[in-house]
Image (spheres, grey):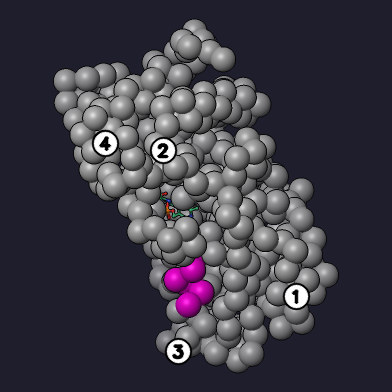
Amino acid sequence: MPTSPRPEWTAVRAQFPAMTQDVSGHPLVYLDSAATSQKPRVVLDALAKYYERDNANVHRGIHELSRRATIAYEEARAKLASFIGAADPSELVWTRGTTEAINLVASSWGLDTLKEGDEVLLSSMEHHSNIVPWQLVAHRTGARLRYIEMDDQGRLVLDDLSELLTERTRLVAVTHISNALGTVNPVREITEHAKKVGALVLVDGAQAVPHRRVDVQELGCDFYAFSGHKMCGPTGSGALWARRELLESMPPYHGGGEMIRIVGRDSSTWAEIPHKFEAGTPNIAGAITLGVAADFLDEVGFDAIAEHEREVLAYALQRLDDLGGVTVYGPTDLDERSGVISFTMGDAHPHDISTILDSRGVAIRAGHHCAQLVMKHFGISATARASFYLYNSTDDVDRLVEGLASVQEIFGPG
Ligand code: 7TS
């Protein structure tokens, strides 16, 4: 088991300027990447370069800067499409992130397609952004929401799937990786079952795309949503991937400039996909620099990232076990989880744990993590959550555990 970071990962970390600062008089230990990741120098530089040299609106002006911005914007689309294994760049719609991508599907496909008696199958480990949009649509259409439940390790219980999936099921919407537990779901297996009853499958990839190679075609899903800011890209960037025929048949979600072909007084016709879903001036700098972030991750390599994160995760779980008094939620098998550790410590409230850690320069998240159904399942209101990314090391784990030891000094051993 490693006790000091490997030099190649120290070099990766050195590319993240935010990671080199002191917080509360201590070198920052950032363990909140499930909320948002830090950004490497190449992404920050690309952002400045875009605004310094190429800033112009896309698909509009016939001038050099607009040409440059448009080319870079569409090149980034092609890059991200291939990054997730899409067949064609036109299947990738830029959004503000996962939340907007799911709302797009719910409002466009959902309102257009769902009828009274139809069913949407969710899971009880979903982030609120894959629950609430479906509730909104269900209330308006009369569709019914059903849930795949979890076991006591926070794994989906798939034994019941053949009962949950019926000819009424129009959509299965599940997370690839849980943000509250780190559980990695067998999406391909779920997709295979869903196809048998003709249901579509939407996958929330917010916690997956940053950490592992995702291939939407291999997964066999129909919609895949993800956020740029959790994968070293800027906030306000992200995308929805969907099969071409679905995007073509779905009505627009927002109306405005650039999503039309011809506008008349009473009605209009729509631009080709993906532009039909991109009304108004998009987040041009966000899309372009998300392309840079994808290149950065590719260069480090997902095999290496996954191996490194697993090493840090295994070390962290062992050290927490050695410390004692820490209840960790989620699967015990490392093959079934990613670099998220959600935990509680006796009577210490997660917010107090987080505050004590913050005073020592260690950033974690405390709360329900926008996954209140997960908290309910475990009979708790909140957890403390440490989440790891490629720039974290076993040294960070040591600092976390030192901080937790001081929590125990204050609150007792738990
Ligand atoms: N789905 C999952 C699984 C997530 O983890 C998040 C954000 C979202 C959807 C929403 O993504 P957004 O980029 O549109 O906001 N999760 C978290 C989190 O765990 N802490 O802060 C945000």
How dense is the environment of label 1, judged by Cα within 10 Å: few (below 14), some, or many (20 and up)? few
Q: Are marks 4 and 1 in contact (CB under 8 Å)?
A: no
What is the tally of numbered marks visible in this picture? 4
Q: Which mark is residue 412?
A: 4
- Of mark 2 and mark 3, the one earlier in the sequence is 3
- Of tags 3 and 1, the one toward the viewer is 1
Pointer 3: what residue?
266
Element assignment for label 2: loop
- Of mark 2 and mark 4, the one earlier in the sequence is 2
- The image shows residue 159, relative to residue 73, as above or below, that is below
Q: Which mark is residue 326?
A: 2
**Along the horizontal axis of the image, is 243 left or right of 288?**
right
**Residue 146 seen from this side:** yes
SS assignment for the magenta stretch, majority: helix
Which amino acid does the dot numbered 3 rest on? Answer: Asp
Q: Which mark is residue 163?
A: 1
Residue at left 45%, top 19%?
394
Q: Are marks 3 and 1 in contact (CB under 8 Å)?
A: no
Element assignment for label 3: loop
Element assignment for label 1: helix
How far, Cα to Cα, is label 2 from label 1? 37 Å
Residue extent of the magenta highlight:
130-135
For the residue pair 350 and 269, the one nearer the viewer reads as 350
Residue at the front extreme, as displayed? 413
- Of tags 4 and 3, the one toward the viewer is 4
How dense is the environment of label 3, judged by Cα within 10 Å: few (below 14), some, or many (20 and up)? few
- The image shows residue 3, relative to residue 72, as above or below, that is above
How far, Cα to Cα, is label 4 from label 3? 69 Å
For the residue pair 42 and 54, the one nearer the viewer reads as 42
On the image, the x and y values in percent for residue 363 come to 30, 34
How far, Cα to Cα, is label 3 from label 1? 46 Å
